[in-house]
Structure formats: structure tokens, C-alpha cells
Image (tube, helix red, strand yellow):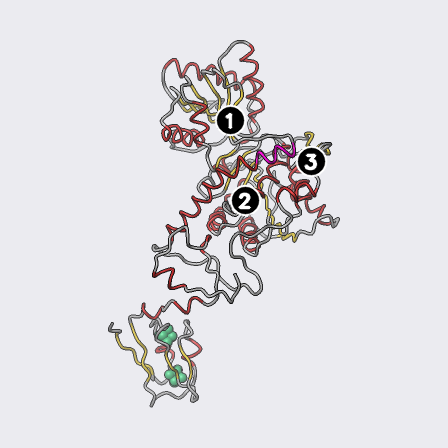
């Protein structure tokens, strides 16, 4: 497809950007339950719906568990389905997340990433999404409102690829992305339809009149493993489909995205690995350190699942030190959530930096500032000097 | 796939279909395939009717959770042993003890 010139620009928050993408996608069914900081996605979308701008069946459910259950039911009929949630909402959906992926239903869900209770907190953190990494969803994390807008569209395209047929979730960090106003370039309805297709083409059997069959069945030890293997094949296919889709999207919009996005990695000795909103801050710091002659780069991670292990190990091999800057928390683990994934990736490909440290930062929405990155860079150099990989609770008062 | 598509569900089992052949998502794209799956094989106890005692009250018919009882024209039960799992609910509900239970021998 040719590049769309003169894309309309609007000042939008991340949440509004998602709603505006949905306006032109016009999904068949949207079951949703409000939760901060996702609320504005659905508020704005409900306005569009009330004004008759979308034909969507909007289902007001009584919980996130029901939202995802309704999404599963609707998607099983071949409908194009969207929902959005955050934090405790993701946690309440947890059971049904596995049913969506196990049933191979290409549901798309926005996660307005927010810290998990207790203590209750409404601010940005990626843990809610990262803990679903084993649920069989294709999982992206975005940096800003534009990426939230774009991922909404890209998500449907990837999920609905017949050889993928997996649900897709994408994160936008609470408040930092969901509520901050930024210019967002938008696409018209026709371009979106040409890109993802006007209707979902079911790649599998679906519930429909005159089409009897059954879904959500029992599979005992004699078949369960084969069906799980199919899901892994879907993920494998997603590895091939994702770069293709991102490329196509780039051709239309001029915005070329990648699973991993290296920045100043040429001849770097040290690198940050980031995901989400803090990537912008990291870029500014890397740029400045580079101008002072420091051999530092960074890699922004977009895809959490499937994990881009090959690309990362290629980028990070032979480095002196890598610092995974992780806005999430896990307890009793060998390292942060993202660092453990990265460690297995490096081990798999047998390509290693000398030191792989991680930093648990910005929990519960605490700011991750340029000063933090500067400090983390000094810390990384120290870890390399002492030849130890560490996990740092960065900026915590002890 | 329409309801007219013939589907030999037994072949899935006979030929031990693998991941590349099984329909994705664990669906069965055909109706009423449970008829091919004889749950009666699980039975440990077998209900047997004493036709003399039966009054045709139909209570056993209604309580059977597996729809494994049909009725003859006198409303006496006929057990479908392909699907009777031997739960003995019919035995318990019969007001005149017209159904006895024997250990299944296979
Ligand atoms: S034993 Fe149970 S399953 Fe069998 S006929 Fe009686 S009620 Fe039905
Ligand atoms: S419950 Fe007993 S008496 Fe009534 S129909 Fe069944 S077998 Fe006959």
C-alpha cells in the first residue's frame, strides 16, 4: 500500500488515541469494564458509540472476568472483538486469558499498565502485563500515544493472520502514556480497512447458524499436548508475521516499528534495555552520554511475546555490560522479569555480554528520570568493573 | 464447514492425529459427535429392570443424567448401555425397587 500523505494530527492522550483508532476500526463487539487508567478509552469510545459513529455491540459487563468471557464468546462467532483493562482487571481476567489463546481467538486488548495491589496504587507499572507472559497472547508494549494508536491497528492485523490466530495485548503505561496529551497522526477508515480488512476472516471453525460444532471442549492427556503445540506454532508464525506487518504499516504511515529498536548500539560497550514510556528518557540520556564520548547505547523492546531472543542476543553479544531497566517487580526470582527472559535468550544463543544487571525502577508510577539513567549507567560500569551481575532496587529508600 | 461435511471423528483417534492435522483451538467442527464416544465403557455398575415390578411411573427416565433411558410404550425403561455410566440414580429413585444393580463384568 502507498504512503498516506497528509495524515490528520490531533492532540490526544494515549487512552483517547486508542479510542480514535477504534472509531475507524469499528470492531463488532466491545465488552468492557471500567478501571483506572483505562477508563478514558471506553469513555471516549462510548461517546462515539452514542453518537452512532460505530456499529459496535457495546457490552456493559459486571467485571473484567465477564468482559473477557464475553470477548471469548463473541470472538468464537467470528466477530472482531476489542476490550481494554488494567492492573487488577488483568488479574481478574487471568483465567479467561488462557481460554482466549487456547481457543485461538484473535481478541485485541489494550492494557493501561498499572501497578498491582496491595497496596492499592493507580499509577504506571508494567507488572500487570508482564505476568501474563505465559498466557499465550502476543504481547506488545508501546512508548507513547502514537504507538498506542498504531498498536491498536497493528494488533488486529497480527492477531487475525490465519497462521497466527492468537489474541493480542498491548500496553500503554498508566498516566504517563494514558493521560498525557501528545500529537497523534491518524488514519482514515478506508486505509485501516485496506490494511486489516473490513471483516475478520475466520481461520477456524466459528459458531454460526447452519454451522454446527463445538468449542471449549475437554481434551485429555491423549490430545492436550498436541493442542498446546499448535499454540506454540501460532507464536512461531507470529515471529514471521510481525516484521511483515510492521513493515507494511511503515509503508503506509512512514512509522517503521521493530520488535527491538537499537539506538546508538554501534561500537557500544554498555547498553540499557528498556520497554515502554521510559525509553524516551533513556534515549535523551544515551544521546547526551554519547556526545560526551561514552560508549553507551540502548535497545527498546517492543515485543514481549513472542520474545525477540535472536535479535537481542545478536545486538548484545560481546558487550561489557547490559542493564535491563525494568518497571516491574517479581519476588525471589534470579533477576527482574525482563532480565530473566533476556538471560535465557542469551543462553539459548550462547552469545553473552560480560555482565547482565537489572534494575527494578519506577514501581507504582514513581518517576524514572534522566538522573536515574545517568546513575544506572555509573552503576552498570561499576558492576562491570567488579564483574558481577546484580539486581538493583533503584531509588528505593532502605 | 457445513453440517453436510462428513466427519469421521473416529479416524482422529484411529490415526492418532497430531497437531498439524487437528482443527486448531480444540474445536470439533461437526455436530453430535459425542454419539461416537461411548461413555458406557466407564460403567462399573449396570442397572437391570425387573419388568414385573415396574409400574411405568417414569421417574427413572427423568432422573437419568445421561439421557441413557428410553421408554417403551408402557413407559417402562429401556437402558442404553452405550451411554449409561452406572450412576445408579435410577435405582435409588425407583419407588418399587424395580431396578437392580449388578457389578459390570467386561
Ligand atoms: S445408572 Fe445412571 S446413567 Fe445408567 S440409566 Fe440409571 S440413571 Fe441413567
Ligand atoms: S422408576 Fe421404577 S417403576 Fe418407575 S418407570 Fe422406572 S423402573 Fe419403572
Residue A216's place in the image compared with A7, above or below, is below
Q: Which picture quadrant has residue A390?
A: top left
> Circle 2 is placed at which residue position?
A159
User: As drawn, is A359 to the left or to the right of A147?
Assistant: left
Q: Residue at x 34, y 84 (%)?
A: B98
What subunit carries mark 2? A
Between circles 2 and 1, the one closer to the viewer is: 2
Q: Position of residue B85 (x, y in %)?
A: 35, 71
Q: Are marks 2 and 1 on the same chain?
A: yes
Q: Which corner quadrant holds the C terminus of chain A?
A: top left
| Residue A71 image point, x, y percent | 56, 51
Earlier in the chain: of badge 3 and badge 1, it is: 3
Cα distance in 3D space between marks 2 and 3: 21 Å
Q: Residue furthest left?
A: B105
Looking at the image, in which quadrant does ligand 1 appear?
A: bottom left
- Tag shown at residue A250: none
User: Disc 2 versus disc 1: distance between alpha carbons?
Assistant: 24 Å
Q: Magenta residues?
A: A246-253
**Screen quadrant of the N terminus of chain A:** top right
- On whether disc 2 and disc 3 are found on a single subunit, the reply is yes
Residue assigned mark 3: A186
Find residue A175 and report its horizontal and vertical position in percent: 61, 33
Q: Can you give x and y, in whole percent of width and height, for residue A24 in the image?
A: 68, 43
Amino acid at each position: 500500500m502507498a504512503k498516506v500523505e497528509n495524515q490528520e494530527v490531533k492532540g490526544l492522550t494515549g487512552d483517547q488515541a486508542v479510542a480514535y483508532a477504534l472509531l475507524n476500526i469499528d470492531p463488532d463487539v466491545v465488552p468492557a469494564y471500567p478501571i483506572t487508567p483505562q477508563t478514558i478509552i471506553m469513555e471516549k469510545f462510548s461517546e462515539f458509540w452514542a453518537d452512532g459513529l460505530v456499529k459496535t455491540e457495546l457490552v456493559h459487563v459486571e467485571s473484567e472476568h465477564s468482559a473477557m468471557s464475553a470477548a471469548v464468546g463473541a470472538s468464537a462467532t467470528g466477530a472482531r472483538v476489542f476490550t481494554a483493562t488494567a492492573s487488577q482487571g488483568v488479574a481478574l481476567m487471568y483465567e479467561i486469558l488462557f481460554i482466549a489463546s487456547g481457543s485461538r481467538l484473535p481478541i485485541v486488548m489494550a492494557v493501561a499498565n498499572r501497578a498491582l495491589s496491595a497496596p492499592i496504587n493507580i499509577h504506571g507499572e508494567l507488572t500487570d502485563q508482564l505476568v501474563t507472559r505465559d498466557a499465550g497472547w502476543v504481547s506488545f508494549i508501546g512508548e507513547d500515544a502514537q504507538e498506542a494508536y498504531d498498536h491498536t491497528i497493528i494488533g488486529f492485523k497480527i492477531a487475525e493472520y490465519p497462521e497466527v490466530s492468537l489474541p493480542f495485548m498491548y500496553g500503554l503505561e498508566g498516566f504517563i502514556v494514558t493521560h498525557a496529551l501528545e500529537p497523534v497522526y491518524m488514519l482514515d477508515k478506508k486505509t485501516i480497512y485496506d490494511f486489516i480488512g473490513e471483516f475478520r476472516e475466520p481461520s477456524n471453525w466459528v459458531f454460526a447458524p447452519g454451522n454446527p460444532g463445538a468449542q471449549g471442549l475437554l481434551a485429555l492427556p491423549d490430545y492436550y499436548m498436541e493442542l498446546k503445540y499448535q499454540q506454540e506454532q501460532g507464536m512461531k508464525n507470529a515471529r514471521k508475521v510481525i516484521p511483515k506487518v510492521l513493515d507494511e504499516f511503515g509503508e503506509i504511515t512512514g512509522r517503521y516499528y521493530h520488535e527491538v529498536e537499537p539506538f546508538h548500539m554501534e561500537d557500544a560497550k554498555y547498553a540499557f534495555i528498556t520497554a515502554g514510556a521510559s525509553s524516551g528518557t533513556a534515549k535523551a540520556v544515551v544521546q547526551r552520554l554519547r556526545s560526551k564520548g561514552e560508549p553507551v547505547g540502548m535497545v527498546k523492546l517492543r515485543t514481549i511475546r513472542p520474545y525477540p531472543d535472536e535479535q537481542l542476543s545478536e545486538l548484545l553479544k560481546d558487550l561489557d555490560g547490559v542493564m535491563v531497566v525494568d518497571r516491574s517487580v517479581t519476588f525471589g526470582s534470579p533477576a527482574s522479569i525482563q532480565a530473566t527472559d533476556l538471560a535465557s535468550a542469551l543462553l539459548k544463543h550462547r552469545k553473552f555480554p560480560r555482565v547482565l544487571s537489572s534494575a527494578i525502577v519506577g514501581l507504582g508510577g514513581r518517576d524514572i528520570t534522566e538522573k536515574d539513567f545517568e546513575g544506572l549507567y555509573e552503576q552498570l560500569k561499576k558492576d562491570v568493573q567488579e564483574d558481577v551481575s546484580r539486581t538493583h532496587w533503584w531509588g528505593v529508600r532502605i | 464447514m457445513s453440517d453436510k461435511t462428513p466427519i469421521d471423528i473416529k479416524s482422529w483417534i484411529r490415526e492418532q492425529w497430531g497437531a498439524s492435522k487437528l482443527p486448531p483451538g480444540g474445536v470439533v467442527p461437526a455436530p453430535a459427535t459425542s454419539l461416537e464416544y461411548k461413555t458406557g465403557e466407564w460403567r462399573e455398575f449396570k442397572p437391570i429392570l425387573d419388568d414385573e415390578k415396574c409400574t411405568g411411573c417414569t421417574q427413572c427416565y427423568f432422573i437419568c443424567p445421561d439421557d441413557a433411558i428410553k421408554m417403551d410404550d408402557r413407559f417402562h425403561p429401556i437402558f442404553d448401555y452405550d451411554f449409561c455410566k452406572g450412576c445408579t440414580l435410577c435405582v435409588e429413585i425407583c419407588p418399587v425397587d424395580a431396578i437392580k444393580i449388578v457389578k459390570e463384568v467386561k
